[in-house]
Image (cartoon, rainbow, N blue to C red):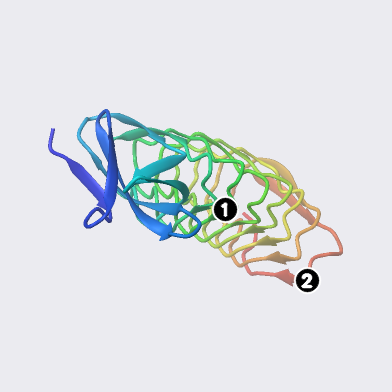
Amino acid sequence: VVPQTSGTTNKYFYSNADGYSLYFSVTSSSAKTATLTGCTTTKDTVDINIPRTVNYNGNNYTITKIGENAFRNQTRIANIDGMKNVTEIGSYAFSDCVKLKKVTLPKKLDKIGDGAFTGTAIAKIEIPEGVKEIRLETFENCKKLKEVLLSKDVRIIGRSAFAGCDNLSSINFDNLEEIGIKAFENNKSLVGELALKNVVTLGTEALYGCSGITAVSFSDTLQVLGEREAY
């Protein structure tokens, strides 16, 4: 099997496991923290467990961040676990990992970058408390995504965050205050009446093409209503 590499792997220390290698850089020498920057896989299908710490020059560094593009276009990864101390997932970190079916997000997580899981095969995702925003394109074109469990802390759904998620049928809108442009565009599996109880801003085409939605209701909190907001 030809090795497949993503992210930044040069001039960094690394750890090896069965079928893959993970690469890291020091984020803070004083705090002893590290960022996972890249990955190389050597098997057709790989389950990755991201460790809590990694040792470098005799010191243990806590992995607190998954860097931008770290696993981007890794077409062999099926599952991601671990990440117990991770507080941030960088932009496009797992983008286009087309085999990626399952990700367990850590309880300490407070930021998910733009496009972090775009084009993956995730079917269900639970967003932990502490994450306040689902950013630009985070889950765009996740064609197998059916269920999203948002914590009460999530207030903002960014532009195109769930656009093209054809099978998304379960997500709680109750605590949302802002839904961005094209956020749920063409999500035909959202059905019935939709009550946006706390929404202040609904972006242009936020629900465009959601043909299963029969009605949308708002409360007096609504201040900004974009064009072509519904089906």
Q: Give the residue type at disc 2.
A: Gln
Q: Is residue 58 visible?
A: yes
Q: Residue furthest front?
A: 58
Looking at the picture, does residue 82 appear above or below residue 195?
above
Query: Which residue sits at x=21%, y=30%?
Result: 43
Of 77 and 212, nearer the camera is: 77
- Is the residue marked by circle 1 packed among few (<14), some (14-19), or many (20+) residues within 10 Å? many
Q: Quadrant of the C terminus?
A: bottom right
Query: Considering the numbered disc 2 on the image, is that residue within a helix, a strand or a loop?
Result: loop
Circle 2 is placed at which residue position? 223
CA gap, disc 2 to disc 1? 19 Å
Provide residue 129's location: percent of width, then percent of height. Answer: 68, 46
The residue located at (31%, 48%) in the rendering is 57
In the image, taking residue 53 as reference, residue 109 lies left or right, namely right
Q: Reading the chain from its start, which is encountered first: label 2 or label 1?
A: 1
Residue 75 appears in the rendering: no
Please report contact status of discs 2 and 1: CB closer than 8 Å, yes or no: no
118 displayed left or right of 187: left
Which residue occupies the extreme right position in the image? 220
User: Residue 122: percent from the left, percent from the top?
Assistant: 46, 37
Residue 4 percent coordinates (x, y): 20, 43
Where's the N terminus, which quadrant? Answer: top left
Residue type of the residue flagged with mark 1 = Phe
* Residue drawn where x is 47% and y is 47% of the image: 62
Residue 229 place in picture, x, y as percent: 64, 62
Left or right of 168? Residue 132 is right
Q: Relative to 176, does residue 39 appear above or below in the rendering? A: above
Residue neighbourhood size for the residue with mark 2, other residues' Cα within 10 Å, grouped as few (<14), some (14–19), many (≥20): few
Question: Which residue position holds label 1?
Answer: 184
Out of 207 and 173, give the one closest to the viewer.
Answer: 173
Drawn side of residue 162 relative to residue 170, left or right: left
Q: Point out the residue furthest to the left here.
A: 2
